[in-house]
């Protein structure tokens, strides 16, 4: 994920870590990823995103890429960036595959305060109705955006699918 983000032009790259920080910190740092320690990780996923907001520069886009969606193509990130730049109204750029919303999501600076105002356990999707036409849904030919990986078995299956697809 860090390599793909970097190759797609996202920098700096930070990872918000919680329960498994001691295990993943060395690997992340070895790959040039800034580690943001978040002891309140159990309070909710939005709280983790909020912990990462403090590492952002002003005026920068935020790519929210949950760790359970690791098989996203670099071309998808570039498509999201291009579409965001071509639509001045878009504040929330959401990839879709076969009409299903996925990850990662590109969030423009105008929506960051809205994220900061949520409770740590409120899902980010509650912002979508408020943003209305400022949500840009971008169809992509990348099943990785909807390939949720929550178990070792799911990871093995998705990895096998990804390898056969990517050659």
Image (spheres, rainbow, N blue to C red):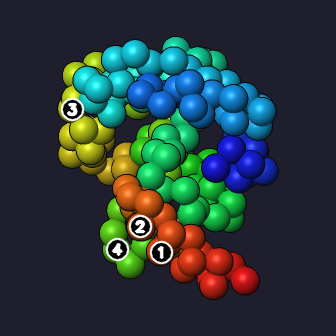
Where in the figure is residue 51, as x and y percent of width and height?
Answer: 44, 19
Does the CB distance between marks 1 and 2 fall below 8 Å? yes
* Residue in the image at 69% along x and 36% along y: 27
Query: Rounded to the nearest whole Å, what is the CA distance between mark 2 and mark 3?
Result: 26 Å
**Sooner in the amino-acid sequence: mark 2 or mark 4:** 4
> Is residue 70 positioned above or below 27 on the image?
below
Residue beneath disc 2: 154
Does the CB distance between marks 2 and 4 fall below 8 Å? no
Residue beneath disc 3: 122
Secondary element at tag 1:
helix
- Please state which of the two labelled residues, at mark 1 or mark 3, is closer to the viewer: 1
Q: Quadrant of residue 124?
A: top left
Estimate how packed mark 4 is, as few (under 14), some (14 to 19) or many (20 or more) residues with alpha carbons within 10 Å.
few
**Sooner in the amino-acid sequence: mark 1 or mark 4:** 4
Query: Rounded to the nearest whole Å, what is the CA distance between mark 1 and mark 4?
Result: 22 Å
* Residue in the image at 21% along x and 45% along y: 129
């Amino acid at each position: 994920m860090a390599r793909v983000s970097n190759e797609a032009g996202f920098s700096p790259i930070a990872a918000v870590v919680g329960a498994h920080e001691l295990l993943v910190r060395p690997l992340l740092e070895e790959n040039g990823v800034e580690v943001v320690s978040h002891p309140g990780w159990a309070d909710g996923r939005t709280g983790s995103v909020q912990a990462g907001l403090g590492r952002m520069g002003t005026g920068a886009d935020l790519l929210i890429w949950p760790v359970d969606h690791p098989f996203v193509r670099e071309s998808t990130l570039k498509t999201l960036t291009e579409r965001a730049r071509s639509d001045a109204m878009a504040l929330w750029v959401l990839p879709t595959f076969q009409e299903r919303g996925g990850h990662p999501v590109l969030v423009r600076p105008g929506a960051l305060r809205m994220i900061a105002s949520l409770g740590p356990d409120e899902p980010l999707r509650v912002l979508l109705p408020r943003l209305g036409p400022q949500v840009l849904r971008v169809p992509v030919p990348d099943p990785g955006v909807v390939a949720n990986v929550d178990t070792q078995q799911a990871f093995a299956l998705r990895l096998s699918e990804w390898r056969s697809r990517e050659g």
